[in-house]
Image: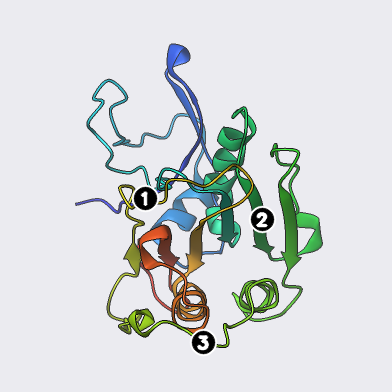
Amino acid sequence: MPPCATYTLRQLRAAQAEVDVDFVLHGETGPASRWALHAVPGDRVLLLAPDAHLAASSEGWEWKPPAGVGQVLLVADETALPAVAGILEELAAQAAPPRTLALLEAAHAGDVLALQAPASAEVVWLPREGAAHGQPLLQAVQARLPAAAAVAADSALDEIDVDTQILWEQADAMADMAGAAAGSGPLYAWVAGEAGAVMAIRRHLVRDCGLDRRAITFMGYWRKGRVLD
């Protein structure tokens, strides 16, 4: 079986049967990056994607905030930027989008992108500039959402070994978050990037801050030192 990997469609032009897929190049360290480095016009790829004509199909669609959310926290490194860009564009198209904070990590200041976001959204870029992967993100999350003085007993968190397991937890889209006005009320968090960093942020948000796990999506897109493609 040929190598395969999961990527976000950055743009879809159905009428032209065209899609845009953004790659983060990281050398000859895995099949996907290796393919992107050497791809030339005319190379063949096989794409599998959700069918928009099937209303009940939600496979491959991980942006599912519970109804009634008043605040959104987006936390991502460069591997999740295409997904975050799409999320921000969707929020910008809403008449009354929730208050949104996007914390985005990139390798260098020169990697910062112009994103379409709601006027009420705050987009914060965090260039690593040599720092460890995920360190700027974790520090920013801890600064913006300090640990609670008292955390509910049900905030206990099972640990996941990100070296042997894939960290992938979806929010409960059916969770009862109703009653919140736009810009206030329950928080929904969407966290994606290097699995070790996502795990540390997961630990802080749930265990230290006591946030409702039903309203948080955690996704380890990749693991430093491992090839997941």
Relative to 96, does residue 18 appear above or below in the rendering?
above
Q: Indicate the position of residue 11 as horizontal and vertical percent values.
A: 53, 30
Query: Given the image, on which type of amino acid does mark 3 rest?
Result: Ala
Kindly identify which residue carries mark 1.
6
In the image, 106: left or right of 57? right
Spatial CA distance of label 1 from label 2 is 26 Å
Query: Which of label 2 and label 3 is nearer to you?
Result: 3
Seen from the viewer's position, the closer of residues 20 and 162 is: 162
In the rendered structure, find residue 82 and report the number of the disc placed on it: none
Relative to 18, does residue 118 appear above or below in the rendering?
below
Relative to 53, does residue 200 appear above or below in the rendering?
below
Residue at 45 percent across and 50 percent down: it is 35
In the rendered structure, find residue 150 and report the number of the disc placed on it: 3
> Outermost residue toward the front?
179
Residue at 71 percent across and 41 percent down: it is 115
Q: Indicate the position of residue 169 as horizontal and vertical percent values.
A: 33, 63
Q: Indicate the position of residue 95 as horizontal and vertical percent values.
A: 62, 27
> Outermost residue toward the bottom?
149
Which circle's residue, 1 or 2, is located before the other in the chain?
1
Query: Given the image, on which type of amino acid does mark 1 rest?
Result: Thr
In the image, 85: left or right of 28? right
Seen from the viewer's position, the closer of residues 78 and 167 is: 167
Kindly identify which residue carries mark 2.
101
Query: Given the image, on which type of amino acid does mark 2 rest?
Result: Leu
Which circle's residue, 1 or 3, is located before the other in the chain?
1
In the image, 173: left or right of 145? left
> Outermost residue toward the left?
1
Relative to 74, does residue 205 appear above or below in the rendering?
below
